[in-house]
Amino acid sequence: MRGFLAVVEMAFRLFFRDKHGLFWGVAFPLMLMALIGTVFSSGTNLVLTTSVVADAGDPMARELTEALRQIETLRIVDETEPEALEALRRGDRSLVVVLPTVAEVAAAGGTAPVRVYYDEASYEIAQAGIAIVRSVVEEANKIMTGRRDVLTVDASGISAYNLTMFDFLLPGVLAMVLMQNGLMGVTAVLTAYRERLLLKRVLATPFPPGLFLAGLVARFTITNLLQGAIIVLVGVLVFRAQVVGSYLNMFLLSVIGSVAFLSIGFAVSTLSATPDGANTFGSALTFPMMFLSGTFWPREFIPDALQPVIDLLPLTPLVEALRGVATHGHGLEMHWPGMLYLAGWGAVAMVLAVRRFRWE
C-alpha cells in the first residue's frame, strides 16, 4: 500500500508541473475558431423539433399545419397534447404548438390563441421558433380576414424552475472536462513515461507493474472527480447555477464517464511512442466531440447531415445524461442505454489497451 500511495503522489507531482501552455495558448484557439466557423457558417443549421397538436378534420388547423411544414427550420411531429408536453419536459422537443379549430375561434368570439409551449432551459433557442410561428399566424390572419386578427400567439414556458443559459452549459462543461482529462491527460503522461524509460525501470524493480498502473489510474480518477466537483461548486456557489436533479446521480455519471474516457485514453496512448504524437491522436478525438456532442449548444444547431455522427460519439450520451439530471431532474434509469453505450466504449478501449500496452 505504501508503494501504491507513493506512485499516486509521484503522479500528482508530475501532473501539476505539466501545464501544456503551448498547446492551449496556440492550437486550441485556432481549432476553436475553425470548428465554430464550420458549424455556424451555414444559415440553415438551426432545426427545431416541433410537436403540432391539431384536429386533422378541421380545415383551418389542417392548413396551418401544412404552412408550418413548409418552414425548413421546423421539424414537425404530429402528437396529442399530453404526449407532446411530456416529450418537451424530457427535452426531446423544442416547441409544442397547439392549433385551435374553427369552432373554438367562433366560441371565443372570433379570436383564439395558438398556444406555443417551450422549454425554459432553452429559452434563447425557443424564441427563434416562436418568431417563426408568429409570422405564420400573421400571414394566416391576412389570408383569412384581410382586416383583423382571428388568431393570436400565446407562448408559455414549460419548466418547474427558472433556468438560465448557464444552467444549460454547466453539465456540458463538466462532461467536456471529464473527456478531455481522459483523452489528453493520460495519453501524454504514459507516452512521456515510456519515452523517458520510466516504465522500463518499473519492470526492473520488485514493485508489481500492475500496481504501478493502478496508481496512475487512481490519480487520474481522483483528479477528474475533483475537477468536476470544483466546476459544479463554482457554477453553483459563484454563478448561481441551478442543479435540479440529484448531485449523487451527477457524481455516479461522472465516475462512469471518467473511467470510460480514461480507458479510451489508455488505448490512444498505445498508438504513439512520443507525447507529441499522443497529443495529436488525442486532439483528433477530443475536438470533434467537444463541439458536436452538445457541450456548448443544442444538437438542433448542428446540420442534419452530422446528426448520425453525433449519435455515435461517446461524449454525447454523457452530455445528455448530465444535462438531463441537472436541468430536468432525470433519474439514471432514463439514460441507462446511453450509459451502457459509453461503458461499452470504455470496455472495448481497455481490452485494446491491455493487448497493445508497451512498457518500453
Image (cartoon, rainbow, N blue to C red):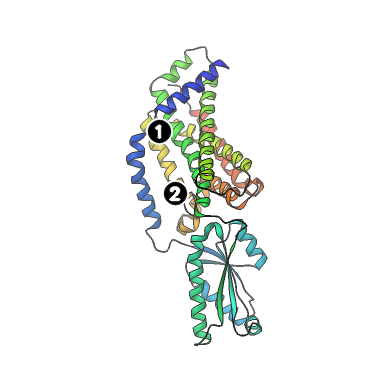
Residue 218, position as x, y percentages in the image: 54, 27
| Label 1 Cα crowd, 10 Å radius (few <14 / some 14-19 / many 20+) | many
Task: Classify mark 2: helix, strand or loop.
Answer: helix
Quadrant holding the C terminus:
top left
Q: Which mark is residue 278?
A: 1
User: Between marks 1 and 2, how big is the CA–CA gap?
Assistant: 21 Å
Label 1 residue SS: helix
Circle 2: residue type: Phe
- Residue located at (52% from left, 12% from top): 206
Query: In this orientation, does residue 270 appear?
Result: no
Q: Measuring 58% from the left and 58% from the top, which residue is drawn there?
A: 92
Q: Write down the residue under mark 2.
A: 291
The residue closer to the viewer here, 197 or 138, is 138
The total number of labels drawn is: 2
Q: Is residue 47 above or below residue 151?
A: above
Lower sequence index among marks 1 and 2: 1
What type is the residue that disc 1 sits on?
Answer: Ala
Instruction: Give the answer, above or below, for where 109 lies relative to 233.
Output: below
Quadrant in which the N terminus is drawn:
top right
- Residue 34 visible to the viewer: yes
**Left or right: where 271 falls relative to 111:** left
Look at the picture and state if 216 lies above or below 105.
above
> In x, y percent, where is residue 104?
65, 81
Where in the figure is residue 271, as x and y percent of width and height? 43, 32
Is 328 positioned to the left or the right of 46 in the image?
Answer: right
Percent position of residue 275, x then y: 38, 30
User: Residue 117's mark?
Assistant: none
